[in-house]
Amino acid sequence: MKKRAINIALLGIGTIGTGVAKVLMNKTKTLARQAGSPIDLKLVVEKDTSRYGVLGLDKKLFTDDYEKAVKNKDIDIVIELIGGEYPAYDFIKKALTNEKHVVTANKEVMAKHGARLLSIAREHHVGLRFEASVGGGIPLIAPFQRDLVANDIQAIYAIVNGTTNYILTRMAHDHIDFSVALKQAQKLGYAEANPSNDVGGLDAAYKLGILTSLGFDMAVNFNQIYYEGISKMKSKDFRYASEFGYAIKLLAIAKRSNDLVEARVHPVLIPAESLLAKVDGVYNAIYVTGDLVGNVLFYGQGAGRSI
Ligand code: HSE
């Protein structure tokens, strides 16, 4: 008997959405083999419907009506790639309450509302997956949710923002100022046109909120995470750091101390010979210490990989 296809609605075709649509269109055989059924991109929801041409998709698949996707009974999985808190949060919530599985890369929504949305997903017996919200393509969320669960996590030290890591790498190696390094990052497409969330540390703080809630199994109040960015860094800071045997990295840190967990994002001096000091460019790395696993390092490209 021919297997029924799994129908997907994709919300948002910006850079990431376009990449995901291409994967869904170009890797049909691999995906069908893995899923056990064909996967069909049934609906693309985008405010600017004139963008259908970008993907060479049938115009009929395009709509600007988000409600239609999250309520459509033929849709099994909603992929949310609109970004930002609202209306993305509302669409995810509606999709889950309408018994659709949801996949999202939305770090802001997951950092601020993850606990609530995961509970709605459980109530409605559907999945909410957010692997791409932290660490780009590094398999990270699933190991925290599955493989590390018997561990008492003691600490997470993470480089989770590719843009700032690229800028700090250029400042350290090429002895250039922050503004020059930022321009280079923008030219190469690593930094966004408005890079304030990245360079201000907010993007890393969202990601730390997600990692802290998973690693320490707690509801994190995102507003309690301290964050500070890199825009005040000077070229001479790197020279002094290097003379004393240190590198400077923007670290997202979560640490257990007694019954509390501290969570903060800021530039940190770290010994030049440490593993995290050697993570350069747009790469991300997440160093986790747990009582059973010891020390484990997740490493890979965060931002900037075009699919
Ligand atoms: N702006 C983010 C970064 C993209 O630079 O890491 C990936 O979340």
Image: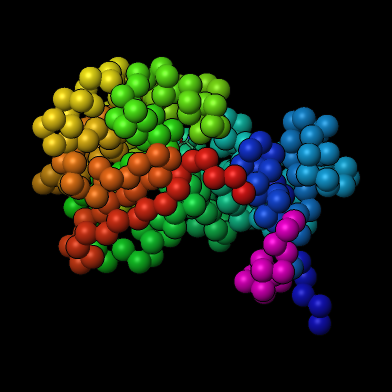
Q: Is residue 26 magenta?
A: yes
Q: Where is residue 250 in the image (x, y as percent from the top left)?
A: 30, 33
Which of the 4 quarters of the picture holds residue 26?
bottom right
Residue drawn at the location 38% of the way across and 45% of the way down: 284
Residue 13 is at least partly visible in this image:
yes
Q: Is residue 6 above or below residue 280?
A: below
Query: As rendered, which of 127 and 293 lies closer to the eye?
Result: 293
Looking at the rendered image, the quarter that the N terminus falls into is bottom right
Which of the 4 quarters of the picture holds residue 60?
top right
Q: Is residue 179 above or below residue 166?
A: above
Q: What type of secondary structure mainly makes up the magenta span?
A: helix
Q: Where is residue 136 in the image (x, y as percent from the top left)?
A: 48, 47
Q: Where is residue 191 in the image (x, y as percent from the top left)?
A: 50, 29
Q: Is residue 241 magenta?
A: no
Residue drawn at the location 59% of the way across and 52% of the way down: 102
Residue 192 is at least partly visible in this image:
no
- Give the magenta part as a residue range: 25-37
Drawn side of residue 72 relative to residue 36, left or right: right
Drawn side of residue 115 relative to residue 89, left or right: left
Residue drawn at the location 50% of the way across and 57% of the way down: 122
